[in-house]
Amino acid sequence: MAGRLSEGDDLSENHEINVTPFIDVMLVLLIIFMVAAPLSTVDIAVDLPVATAKPQPRPNKPLFLTVKSDLTLAFGNDTITRGQLAGSLDSATGADRQQRVFLRADKTVPYGEVIKVMNLLRAAGYLKVALVGLEDAPPPPQAVQPQPGTPGTATSP
């Protein structure tokens, strides 16, 4: 209950609601939802290694699916159409959909096209997809310069 001071001694009640705490709570909730919303939009399950991970051992007969720069698909060394993808994978794996498919794409292929191929793999029942990239070459070791005055080095006067 609040009171209002006026010119007279008669104090009347103030019936206004203080909305400041309500607005503060709403702004905090807005910030929480703005931060949390982008985190809940990832739907594609992909087995991606960390950049510093050691290379995984290669299977005996890896299944390589390649998206070429002209957006055609190649399974192994054979060029296939998108409609032939499921049949080619089934014949190569004996319909074993638990085998991992290694997906390679040219640098110039748009990201959307890679996702379309991954959707084709998912529709065919192959959920284990590994993305293939080039390993980054380690930097050459730095040549160690001997400090003057250390044993084994010659110093000039």
Image (tube, grey):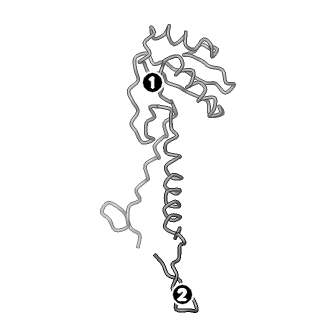
Mark 2 highlights which residue?
Answer: 5
127, 70: nearer the viewer? 127
Q: Is residue 48 above or below residue 143?
A: above
Q: Tags 1 and 2 in contact by the CB under 8 Å rule?
A: no
Q: Position of residue 11 (x, y in %)?
A: 51, 85
Q: In what element is the residue under mark 1?
A: loop
Query: In what quadrant of the picture does the N terminus appear?
Result: bottom left
Instruction: Left or right? Give the position of 41 relative to 73.
Output: left
Q: Which residue is mark 1?
A: 128
Q: Separation of disc 1 and disc 2 at Cα?
A: 74 Å
Q: Can you give x and y, in whole percent of width and height, for residue 151 in the image?
A: 30, 63
Amino acid tagged 1: Lys
Nearer the observer: mark 1 or 2; the answer is 2
Secondary structure state at the residue bearing disc 2: loop
Most foreground residue, 47 or 119 = 119
Instruction: Give residue 154's quadrant in the image.
Output: bottom left
Residue 100 falls in image quadrant: top left
Instruction: Tell me: 142 left or right of 17.
Output: left
Quadrant containing the C terminus is: bottom left
In the displayed structure, 41 sits above or below 69; it is below
In the image as oriented, which residue stretches furthest toward the right?
70
Q: Residue at x 61, y 30 (%)?
A: 106
Q: Residue at x 48, y 40 (%)?
A: 137
**Amino acid at pointer 2:** Leu
Q: Mark 1 or mark 2: which comes first in sequence?
A: 2
Count of marks, rendered view:
2
How many C-alpha atoms fall within 10 Å of the one at disc 1: few (<14), some, or many (≥20)?
some
